[in-house]
Image (tube, rainbow, N blue to C red):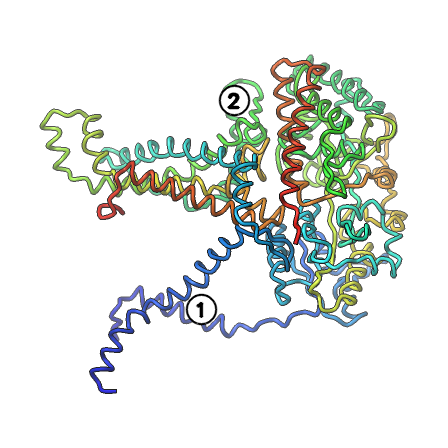
Amino acid sequence: MNRDRWWKLQARAAPYLFVSPFLAVFCCFMLYPLSRSLLLSFHKTIGPRHSVFVGWSNYRYLLGHDRLFGLALLNTAAYTAAFLALQIPMSLGLALLLSSRRVRFRNLFRFSFFSSYLVGQVFVGVIFFQLFGPDGLINHIAGAVAGHRVVIPWLSSPNLAMPSVLIASLWLATGYGMVYFLAALQSVDPELYEAAEMDGAGNWQRFLHVTLPGIRPMLAYVVLVGAIGGFQLFELPFVLLQGAGPDARGLTVVMYLFIMGFNTGDLGYASAIGWMLVAILLTLTFIQFRFFRFRPEIGT
Amino acid sequence: MRFSLGKPILVLSLAAAISAVAVWRHPVPPRADLVLWTFDQTDARTYRDRFPDAHGRLMPSLAEQFQQQFGPRVRISLIGELGENIRLASALMSQADAQTPDLCEIEIHSIGQFLRPPCDDVGLLPLNDFLEKSGWGRRIVASRFAPWSKTDPRTGQRIIYGVPADVHPVTITYRKDLFEEAGVDLEAAKTWDEFQDRCLSFQRYWAAHGHRDRRAIALSTGGPDEIVEMLLQRHINLIDRAEKLHFTEAKLLETAIFYAQLLAGPRAIGADVSSGVGWTEDLARGNVCAVCTPDWKAGYIRQFSPELSGKVRMMPLPKFEPSDAPTSTSGGTMIGICRTCPHPEQAWKLLEFLCLSPQANQARIAAGDDILPAIPDYWNAPVYHQRDPFFAGPSGTGGGQDVGDLYIRLARQIPERFVTPYTFQAELVLVAVLHRAEEYLASGGRTDGLSQPCAEWLAEAQDELQRRIDFGKFEP
């Protein structure tokens, strides 16, 4: 083989060689498990040696008859909607506040608000488990305000279980959203604010017509990530409510998947739940892309 | 020397290289001849730690003694319960011999998933022959095999997959000091109705003395524990051994309505307590003044609320009707042998030694484990017949209560409890029905008007669950 041909061969093979480690790992740890789980979702599996192909039966049951899945979906959707409705304004508000030059110790505050995100869902679950107890700090404060012992059944009342999870997750994630909005706010051209001010725009109008359009791609991203995170909610309610919670009001789709897979041992059905979740998330993402008219080139 | 990609990349690369070498060269410990997985810290300590004999001399640990007597090296692995369940399920499904332990301990709430396959495919080894040949099958409390066994539909034979480690009879522990102050003799209540009446008197007294929020007994509004205990007392399993559902039984309806009105409406006496072990503090503060206590739970009161010493007392469960058991059962652990174990005979020997032998019982007692074993022969040990000063003696007497004797008396009468892969979901569904019943009562509904709607809710629940069970049935 002459030198020219050798170089050409190298040039042609090099890209494949460079991506091959990633491809190998991706195939082993992503593609294979994903395709296996897709296959599993069309099977009824039991024990180590038996599985039977059941076609769409798992999906039909899931969508047509499974009340618990419906409940889990409803809980998760309600949580996600409430989470986004609260997290986005709170994160954005914090970001606006902490991007103002009039606030002293801005970096300290930024770090403080973000730091809750570093501890993770399980840890937050453990902390709020103590705070929300019948004799926890929150009831103590309520009692101090009311002037007598107050027992709000945060974790044992079906109507308060999910709001408790919501409060804990907002504590966890508001700072996280704030960091993204802070970055986005810095990219808004200051001249636009000056121009708006010269045109007589007030604070609210500047926010509405300059800030919001300026951070729109980031807003879309935070909403998207929040929605995906909301639908994947598992550890926090699992720790905080010690399972599905009172009257299964803390049951989420992923928790239900876990229960079917590891409490009932039906891996085929659990896989079907997983793929149903994928379908829901893809649909949500598609809707959001349409809603925000998301353009990847200006995105994150 | 310069590194063209920059110092951070150089440092990271070096760290990665050093780690890789360290991992590569790290010696892999030789696999022990027998590996046991346990989720229970006390059990792990009992098996691994040295303990004093009757004369106070320090004995080798049970694992060491086994190795000395029988030869095989034993490793006891303590694994978090959730982690053990997932790893075990995964190992048994994949039949990965190297990853599968030889023996494992499984908690009662987790056993259902492992018993889902047909009898021949359950990942645990049937122990009937071992139990029969060794004679242990006749020495262990018979009703405690129920959760760990499955009926073979082909032969009708009950296949036992685990040896029970405990019995867990249930009593009620109450604040004797507070009930006495209110002039209520709680132990005189022999039926649940009488119990409720006395608790209402108790609450009225304390409400008039500035404790309006004081509730008589801890009952869960969001969990199934106490309602399941009551149902078991009446010999009702939500799903029985043959996977038949019992939601539409008259007794279940009656119990569900009774339970709902213990929690809501004008005759409510129960309240939720803090999760985890926080309930002991609720008891100590007098937020709730009685609690259902299986033997493992009674120990928590002593451990986490020592200030209650001499202020609490134990009583059997009141009954609904004479045929009910004066107790129930809650929780439980078994030890089983994995089907992939290459030396089942050796594994059985280890199981016998760690779980059933007199040495094992001695080690448990030495470790301060006051849970009653499942072998009545051992109930004669003096430790189970000592007066416990933590629990108050009868009124006017001192010296503590014979708590061990009470548990032993009740242990002989514990009802059978079955666990299936769907038991967990059945409990979830029952709690949902109870919640509807509680809401009905809380909104002013009358108890006698609850029968009709509650029966309908239970029937709906049964239909739904039956569909699920039918759907989950495996027909190869």
Residue A37 x, y percent position in the rendering: 50, 54
Q: Chain of mark 1?
A: B
Mark 2 residue element: helix
Look at the image and tell me whether residue A109 can be seen.
Answer: no
- In this rendering, the answer to whether A150 lies above or below B28 is above
Residue B314 x, y percent position in the rendering: 80, 32
Mark 1 residue element: helix
Quarter of the image holding residue B178? Answer: top right
Residue B159 x, y percent position in the rendering: 79, 53
Horizontal side of residue A112 vs A65, given as left or right: left
Disc 1 residue crowd, few under 14, some 14–19, many 20+, Cα 10 Å: few
Whether label 2 touches label 1, CB < 8 Å: no
Quadrant position of the N terminus of chain B in the picture: bottom left
Residue A150 x, y percent position in the rendering: 56, 22
- Residue on which disc 2 sits: A144
Quarter of the image holding residue B273? Answer: top right
- Residue on which disc 1 sits: B19
Q: Chain of mark 2?
A: A
Alpha-carbon distance for marks 2 and 1?
54 Å
Decide which of B181, A16 is in the foreground and name it.
A16
Look at the image and tell me whether residue A243 can be seen.
Answer: yes
Q: Amino acid at mark 2?
A: Ala
Residue sitting farthest toward the bottom? A1
Question: Which residue is at a point 40% across and 68% down the rendered structure image?
Answer: B16
- In this rendering, the answer to whether B256 lies above or below A192 is above
Horizontal side of residue A219 vs A235, given as left or right: left
Decide which of A69, B99 is in the foreground and name it.
A69
